[in-house]
Image (tube, rainbow, N blue to C red):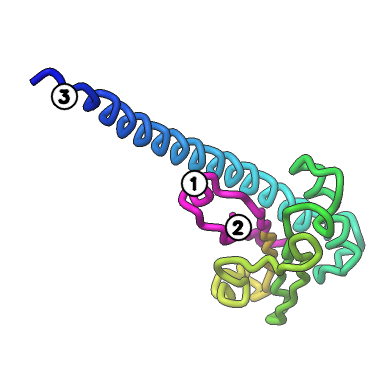
Amino acid sequence: MKSKQQGSFTVELAFVLFFTSALLVFTGDIALQLLNRVNLDRVSYSLVNILKERTRFYEEKPIVTASEVDEIDILAARLLGYPNTSEAAPYGVRVEWLVDGGYGGIDKGIGGGTPCRPDDSLQDKASLVPINSAHKTFPLYQVTLCLKIDSWFNQFWGDSEQHYIHSSSVMPGR
């Protein structure tokens, strides 16, 4: 009877170690994605506040220009810890605005190519535009950051599809 059960411990240990390894990889992958998401949330909120406050210091022009989006891209690179802007780094920036009922947006794609698309476009949020008692509408700004990530868990199972994390922040202007 002893000789029939001799290899069972090794087989059971292999299953337990495989399950534990898969659990650790899954947990580590989720922790890394959450850490990246929190960082994107922080940076997108900071950038939309900078965008909102720029009208106070720069001639009160509520519409965003391409050069201002380039400056936002440089700030995003610095805040995310990348030496290069979105043209060479694995992140992308999209800036959108609603001013006097008109919509506009500029996209700085991931690695200079793949567009950064928010889950909800600012065009769909026109009802959020604040109106004061004199019926003056305020501009509404949205900054979306996208980060290309490698999912360890998906690589563990052989999925080679590229994954992205998105973070958007919306703020009314002055």
Instruction: Residue 162: give x, y in percent of width and height.
Output: 60, 59
- Kindly indicate the quadrant of the structure image that contains residue 142: bottom right
Instruction: Residue 108: give x, y in percent of width and height.
Output: 79, 65
Residue in the picture at 66% in, 54% down: 148
Sequence-wise, which precedes: disc 3 or disc 2?
A: 3
Of the 4 image quadrants, the one containing the N terminus is: top left
Sequence-wise, which precedes: disc 1 or disc 3?
A: 3
Give the camera-side residue of 142 and 150. Answer: 150
Q: Within 10 Å of the Cα at label 2, are there few (<14), some (14-19), or many (20+) other Cα atoms?
A: some
Residue in the picture at 63% in, 60% down: 170
- Kindly indicate the quadrant of the structure image that contains residue 101: bottom right
Three-letter code, disc 1: Phe
Sequence-wise, which precedes: disc 1 or disc 2?
A: 1
Left/right of residue 47 with respect to residue 162 in the rendered view: right
Three-letter code, disc 2: Tyr
Instruction: Residue 55: give x, y in percent of width and height.
Output: 83, 60
- Kindly indicate the quadrant of the structure image that contains residue 138: bottom right
Residue 5's mark?
A: 3
Three-letter code, disc 3: Gln
Find disc 2 in the rendering and name its residue. Answer: 164
Magenta region, residue range: 145-174
Find disc 1 in the rendering and name its residue. Answer: 156
- Element marked by disc 2: strand
